[in-house]
Each structure stands twice: as C-alpha cells, then as structure tokens.
Image (tube, rainbow, N blue to C red):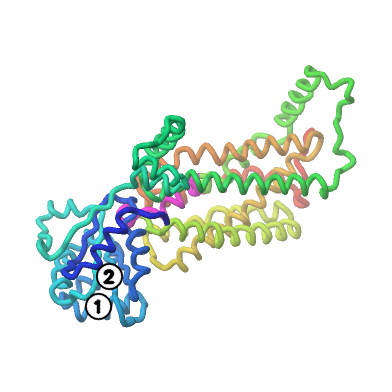
Amino acid sequence: MFERRIQNQLHEWAEKNNRKPLILRGARQVGKTTIVEQFGKEFDNFLSLNLEKKEAKDLFESTDDVKMLLPLLFLYDNKPQRPGRTLLFIDEIQSSPQTVALLRYFYEELPELYVIAAGSLLENMLDKHISLPVGRVEYMALHPCSFIEFLQAIGEGRFVDWILEARLPEAFHQQLMLLFNSYALIGGMPETAAIPQAWSLTFYLLTILFALLFVYHYLFLPHPRRDTCTLPPQQASAGRVFKEFLGTFTSFFQKKHIVSALIFILLYRFAEAQLVKITSPFLLDTPATGGLALSTAEVGFIYGTIGVIALTIGGIVGGIAMARRGLKSCLWTMTIAMNLPNIVYLYLSFARPESIGIISGCVAIEQFGYGFGFTSLTYFMMLFSNGKHQTAHYAICTGFMALGLMLPGMISGWIEESIGYRAFFVWIMLCTIPSFWATHLVRKNLTDNHSDNSSR
C-alpha cells in the first residue's frame, strides 16, 4: 500500500472534537475500501460491513436503535469489543437508503463512535428521492491517483520534490514524459498503479527460473543415443532441410484416422476453453453484475494454491489410472471428469455463496476434474504421434490443441457480456456435448490394449 494524500485528511477528521459520520465518495476502483481498511489498523476496534451482502444489509435495517445495533455489529463481524476507539466502516452504503438515514442517529446518540460510509453510486440516490442527513454528516472525496502518487507507487518517488518545486532539469523531461504516458494509460486507478513494477518483478523472477532450469536440463538430463541429426552435415542444405520439414508435416496428415483425431484434439476442451476465460472475472465482479465480489488476493489464493493442488492431484490420479487400465478403458470416465465438474460454476452463479470455503471447494472440484481428464488428451497425442517423426508430430498435435483452446476462448467474453454469467454457465454445459461426440469418434479407433495410431 502506497501513501495517498487523503490519509492526512482522514487523520484530521478523526482528531476533530465535533466529528460527524464521514461519507467517502468516489468512483469504483479508486481505493476507498483499501484506504479505510488501512486507516482502521490505527483503531482498537475496526468493523467493516459491505451492504451488498444481504445479511449485513438486513442487520442495519432491523432497527434504528444504534446503541442496540453496535453490539450486534461486533457479533456479525465475529470480533470482540475491546476498550478504546472504534471505527465502523459501512461499504457500498448506497445499497441501503435506510442505513444512510441511520447515520444521523450515530451522530446524535453515539458521537464517540467513528463512522465512515463509502459508496460508488451515492449521487444516484438523489434520483430516488432519498434525503441525506444534512448537517449530521460530512463528506470527503477520493479521486484516482495523482501523478505524484503514481510515481511513489512505482518506486520513482525521487522525482517528486523536483516536480513540486518546478526545478526538474530538461535532461529528465523525456523520462518523465514516458512515465506520464504510462500514468495516463492506467488512468490513476491505485490497483493498477503498481502493475508495471509488479510485471517487471514477475518477469525478472521468471527469467531467473528459466535460466536455472536450462542449466539443470543441460547438466543432468540424459541424452538419448537416438537424439541425433537425421541428416549428415554435408547434406544439411537449406533446400534439403525444407524438404524434410515438408515431408514431416505432410506425413502427419497421412496418419490413419487423422480426421477423428483432429476433431478430438480440437473439441475435447471446447467447454473448458470458454470457461477458463470467464471464471476469474466472475469471481471478481460485484454482485450487481452477477459476480461473487472476491478480492484479487482471494482469487489468487483460490486458483494459485487450492486450484493448483487440486489440478496436480487430478493429473497424478489420471496418470495412475491410465497406466493401469489403458486409454480406451479410461476415456469416457476422463471425458466426464473434464466436463461435468463445470456445473459447479452454474451452482455458484445461482447460489452466490459468501463462504470462501464453499467457493474454494467448488473450484477444487473443477480443477481436479480438469487435471484428471486432461491426462487422456495428452496420452492420446503421445500415442497418435508414435512412429517416424514422433517428436515433430507431437509438436503439431500440441499446436492443434492450443488452437482448440484459443478459438473458443476468443468468443467467450462476447458471449458472457451478451447473456450474463448465469446463462453463460448454462451455455458452457451445452458446450460439453461436442467433447462427448469427439470422444465417441476417436474411441472407436482405439484398441483394447491402447495401441498407437501410427502412420501407415
């Protein structure tokens, strides 16, 4: 969290003797919730309630006796009430006009309580003929990051004093213009202000990781005896190499059952290819748009930790099953595992649970099924590539596999925006049908001992 100028204004508000409940105004994604949560760490008690959640909204609307309401808020937030200063943060207050009117009673009956309310659509409430408690609340506006705040966020704070004093040398003008262009592109949203720095760090770490993997592979991986050039050095002319490439590529399309194999590779993940593009926006979007309103950190934990663990376990179990029973015996089971768990997102879109445990469990089920089912596609491509030029043919298979993931994914966003999350997840379940059809086509050509489909 980088420093925002409004933090000083919040401290000044908290120190006033005639302090009134504060309504913090600002557009979405400018950092209202983050600012208040950071500010709340300075208090002995900090309560944070989001009125887009039905339970919190119902609690505030259950009574206008704020002295009786306060202990209930501690109970709802599952926090003990300790002696000292208490900050109550009411987020998305525009969802409950009755709670807006309740602010006057906090001012009149609980003046010792620090109250901050935030909302992104407060101006719209005036259109609903809702009266704000004039004279009993005060307002503060949070705008997107200024250029100065942006520089501090990305680690370029060394320029701040020079800019404020208007004495920056001409030599730095071009560098500052590039930074300003980045700021203008991002739009001053605090969550995106640190993105350039975060991406830089990410790619630096990835570069180091891949360099270490290269060293490990070069030093420790075995070198098969047959891993040699098929052309003698004296014959490796450009024309001969191109001819060999063309022959390798052509021979791939001369394999037996090539049509059914390509249909299977392209359509096996037809539903998953669309689903994977929408799951993160669905988890992040607000309830008003049909999402689950999780934070970026929560989504990162669910997918980056729980999802990866479930995916890995699914892949291991799939590999064991394949080794014991063979591809033909496992193929229908793995196709079901690949597609049927997608229904958990249909459940989430209708049930809209608030429990991170339930959401994590649903994602784990889907990821386990994907890991288990994906094993069959990988193994099928290995078997289909057997024979001459098997490495090149496997590479071609992976290219078609990527194409089968890319093309459906290109239209998934447009489909979701057109019909909404719930209808989109119904559409995903319908899109599992081509996967089952492709499995039926390719399974007829497999033998009981899962022999390969090598070239003629």
Q: Which residue is drawn at 29% across and 71% down?
A: 87
Q: Which residue is drawn at 88% across and 24% down?
A: 233
The amino acid type, in three-letter code, at marker 1 is Leu
Left or right placement of residue 96 versus residue 309 in this view: left
The amino acid type, in three-letter code, at marker 2 is Leu
Name above or below for residue 75 compared with residue 165: below
| Number of numbered tags placed on the structure image | 2
Q: Position of residue 143 (x, y in %)?
A: 28, 49
Residue bearing the label numbered 2: 88
Q: Which residue is drawn at 31% across and 51% down?
A: 28
In which quarter of the view is residue 93 placed? bottom left
Q: Is residue 203 visible?
A: yes
Q: Nearer the viewer, residue 222 or 361?
A: 222
Under tag 1, what secondary structure? Answer: helix
Q: Is the magenta stretch mostly helix, strand or loop?
A: helix
Q: Residue at x 16, y 78 (%)?
A: 65
Left or right placement of residue 53 versus residue 233 in this view: left
- Contact (CB < 8 A) between labels 1 and 2? yes
Query: From which residue to which does the magenta span run?
Result: 274-289
Q: Where is residue 251 in the image (x, y as percent from the top left)?
A: 75, 29
Image quarter (top left, top right, bottom left or bottom right) of the C terminus = top right
In which quarter of the view is residue 245 placed? top right
Q: Which of 116 and 227 is in front in this view?
A: 116
Q: Position of residue 257 (x, y in %)?
A: 70, 36
Front disc: 1 or 2: 2
Residue bearing the label numbered 1: 70
Label 1 and label 2: CA atoms lie apart by 9 Å
